[in-house]
Amino acid sequence: MSLLRRATTWEISESEGESDSEIRSTNRCDSASKPDEEEAPNSQVIAQVNNDQTENCNAALGHLPLQEYETQNKKVRDTLPLPSTAVPSTPSPGKRRRRTREEIDANKVQFEQKKKDREKYKSERAQEKERKSQEQQMRKEAAKRLKSYRPENCLKCLIVCIDTALLQDERSDILLGTLFSMEWNTAIEEQHLTHSITWRRDLPKGEDGPNPVLEEQVLMVLTLNDFLDMVVSIKQSQQKDSDNVAVDSLFKQLSEYLNRNGEKVVTLAVMGPHPNSWTLWSQRHGGQIHQSQMGEEDIDIEEAVVFLQLYRNTSVIFLESWQGLTDHVCAITKALSKRPFKHLTEKDDLPFCLDGSWASGVRVERDGTGLSQVWSRQIQQLNRVSPAVAAGVSSAFASPQLLLKAYRDLDSEGERKGLLADLSVRSGERERRIGPEISNRVYRFLTTQNPQLVLD
């Protein structure tokens, strides 16, 4: 054991001058000679085994000749891998790769683009918020405007203007008392047309336009005697004897007022019964009018009423008392209070004019294109005539003139009535005849001379 230890000691001391290849071969021999055994629980046993393996390896190397020893050394060197000189692809965590100028510029452009996108998004959000706020404000204003035009609110803005001349009649207290009891706005002022009642309406706050709004309705109150004098003035004006019409006559004042204000709609309210008999007229003239003249004068009143309606757009009503006049004024006031709300809520389009290709009819070109469709629709206007039946008739006879010519060529009335009865019409997959009933109606529709004839 002592000899072995010395050899080991001598070999270790002599190995200082050996090359690194000998040391690597020794280490390789040590690693190759280690068995794959489980670790022993005792550390001393493991140390003894390692020492024995080292001594065996050194002894094997010590008995080799020098030439063989160098050859073995060379093989060991050749088997060892060369150190790598390649630069690692990923930098170490502690070091940061320096960016190029192009990368810095690209990052700046990307940052600016992101900044612009954020600003654009913020501006869009702000605009959307502002738009929603404006829409909400507009809806509130529209709802408030609509509420102000409701009849109960619009009635508070209406003012009933009464001419001062009407207050000379003591029975006018009935009208004033009723208006005051309903708490309606009333103004007593001189009007442009004497003995008249007009209306004006104050606009709600924020509304554009002339304020107040003058309504076109005008109610002129006349007594029966004043109306009869107007009838005489109308008759004189129709006889082209305008020089005899008095300057201060009510008809002349009414005509001048309507000439200045063409948009006004005047209604004559005559206080008294309808003069369908000339008893009142005879009483007024002391019974000097004979019975033979009463019918002629009655016709003059009717002609005067028609003349006022056609040429002056003026209607005439007869009221028995001031209570009737009061009720009529209240009815007009309520109707005027409902009109603004109706204008805002109701559509201008007629309900029966629906959108569609048929609403404007068939377009007929200069070369006659479209006439066949017009002829087909003309037949289709008849009751219980389907589009298929109309198309069958128009395909057999391309125009009304050809059908009328076919009627004239036939001898008997029965043949004319049944000319279209045997024409076949296809509706869907089923084919049928037009029949004698529709054929007879089409014949009477085209050949009758009686405009009052009922086809069905």
Image: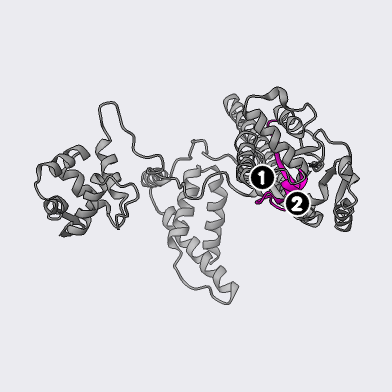
Gap in Å between the C-alphas at discs 1 and 2? Answer: 23 Å
Decide which of tag 1 and tag 2 comes sooner along the chain. 2
Q: Find out whether residue 282 is within the magenta segment.
A: yes
Q: Count the numbered circles shown.
A: 2
Residue 106, how many percent across, how many down? Answer: 58, 29
At 24% from the left and 39% from the top, the residue drawn is 372
Q: Nearer the viewer, residue 290 or 299?
A: 290
Q: Quadrant of residue 249?
A: top right
Q: Which residue is mark 1?
A: 290
Residue 8, how many percent across, how many down? Answer: 53, 57
Highlighted magenta segment, given as a residue range: 262-285
Residue 227, how many percent across, how many down? Answer: 74, 41
Q: Quadrant of residue 182?
A: bottom right
Secondary structure state at the residue bearing disc 2: loop
Quadrant containing the C terminus is bottom left
Q: Nearer the viewer, residue 236 or 422?
A: 236
Answer few, some or many: residues within 10 Å of disc 2's Cα (few below 14, many 20 plus, some between 14 and 19): some
Q: Amino acid at mark 1?
A: His
Q: Nearer the viewer, residue 100 or 301?
A: 301
Q: Amino acid at mark 2?
A: Gly
Residue 272's tag is: 2
Residue 325's tag is: none
At 48% from the left and 49% from the top, the residue drawn is 24
Residue 159 can be seen, yes or no: yes
Answer few, some or many: residues within 10 Å of disc 1's Cα (few below 14, many 20 plus, some between 14 and 19): few
Q: Is residue 15 left or right of residue 253?
A: left
